[in-house]
Image (cartoon, helix red, strand yellow):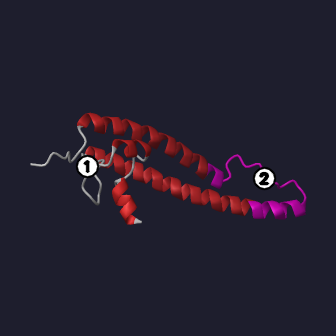
């Protein structure tokens, strides 16, 4: 019979759930701010400034909007990963490495609560 634990106990899962729910609230708030930035809510544009300044500003603004859009996409992915982690908690499969089947260390999960790979599996991945 194996001594390895194949899942976290309910107390540990509850602790991770609370951690993830807190991060999820923050992540969703950040996503709202990014989306508002992209939609120009509260915009203080350069409509009343000189034409040459507007041209420079437009190029800079385009680049900034592209960066914001990339950040929003990353944030959406982060939110989805956290939501998936909550599903794994509900299914009691949270914290199990999807490659090795072993438990991911608590320290790693506290730093990266949506992790699905142990450090060993992550390193082997390259």
| Rendered residue at 26%/58% (across/down) | 100
Apparent side of residue 47 relative to residue 79 in the rendered image (left or right): right
Q: Give me the residue at 70% from left, 46% from top.
A: 42
Q: Is residue 56 magenta?
A: yes
The residue range painted magenta reads 36-60
Asked whether residue 117 is in view, the answer is no
Q: Position of residue 51 (x, y in %)?
A: 89, 62
Above or below residue 12? Residue 120 is below
Q: Image point 62% across, 49% down: which residue?
A: 36
Residue to which mark 1 is pinned: 93
Q: Which mark is residue 76?
A: none
Q: Position of residue 82 (x, y in %)?
A: 41, 48
| Residue with the mark numbered 2 | 45
Instruction: Name the N-terminal-most of marks 2 and 1.
Output: 2
Q: Position of residue 18 (x, y in %)?
A: 38, 36
The residue under the point 87% across, 60% down is 53
Q: Residues within 10 Å of mark 2 (few under 14, many from 20)?
A: few
Disc 2 secondary structure class: loop
Q: Closer to the camera, 20 or 47?
A: 20
Residue 110, quarter of picture: top left
């Amino acid at each position: 019979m194996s001594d390895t634990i194949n899942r976290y106990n309910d107390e540990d899962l509850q602790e991770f759930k609370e951690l993830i729910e807190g991060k999820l609230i923050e992540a969703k708030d950040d996503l709202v701010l990014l989306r508002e930035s992209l939609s120009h809510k509260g915009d203080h544009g350069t409509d009343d400034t000189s034409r040459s300044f507007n041209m420079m500003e437009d190029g800079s603004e385009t680049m900034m909007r592209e960066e914001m859009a990339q950040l929003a996409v990353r944030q959406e992915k982060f939110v989805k990963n956290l939501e998936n982690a909550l599903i794994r908690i509900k299914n009691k499969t949270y914290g199990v490495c999807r490659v090795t089947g072993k438990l991911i260390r608590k320290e790693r999960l506290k730093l990266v609560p949506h992790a699905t790979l142990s450090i060993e599996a992550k390193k082997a991945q390259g």
